[in-house]
Image (cartoon, rainbow, N blue to C red):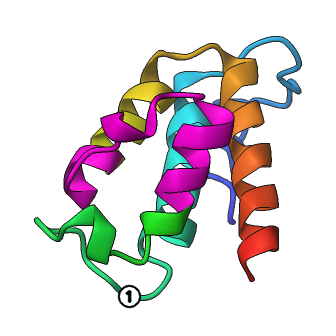
Amino acid sequence: MREKFSDRVGITKPNDVIQLNSMTKELRNLLWNSFSLYYINESGNTINRKRLDESYLKGFAFNLFMYFFKYPLDNLPDFEVEFLGILKEFFVKKDWYEIYNFLDFSLDCNDRTN
């Protein structure tokens, strides 16, 4: 991606610090957007009031609840939009390393289902 004008002319300086023990809000948002585009919009589906048990997200939701969150399976929500709300809340509230744990698990989970 192209540098911002103000960075190119030396008015501002791009952030060149590698985040090892934290996560900026901007990075968290970028990771959520990337995750959302890859998993949620992967098949061109739009999220609506579709039942989760009829959704392409069903297997992913099951694996997350069973093996990552370790929640009771009867707590799985009925609808896609509710499931995605749980994921978004997790992304917003958890520590930076939990976000990376989540993404790592999601990639591994996707590898096993393909």
Q: Position of residue 46 (x, y in %)?
A: 25, 77
Residue 95: in magenta span? no
In the figure, 75 relative to 1: above or below?
A: above
In the image, 94 versus 63, the foreground residue is: 63
In the image, 48 versus 22, the foreground residue is: 48
Q: Is 57 left, or right, of 101 in this rendering?
A: left
Whether residue 6 is visible: no
Residue drawn at x 58%, y 45% as measured from the top left? 64
Q: Which range of residues does the magenta coloring cover?
A: 60-83
Residue drawn at x 66%, y 35% as measured from the top left? 68
Look at label 1 and name its amino acid: Gly
Q: Position of residue 35 (x, y in %)?
A: 57, 56
Q: Quadrant of residue 74?
A: top left
Q: Quadrant of the N terminus?
A: bottom right
Q: Is 12 left, or right, of 82 in this rendering?
A: right
Residue drawn at x 59%, y 28% as measured from the top left? 70
- Neighbor class of circle 1 (other Cα within 10 Å; few <14, some 14-19, many 20+) is few
Q: Quadrant of residue 9?
A: top right
Q: Quadrant of the C terminus?
A: bottom right
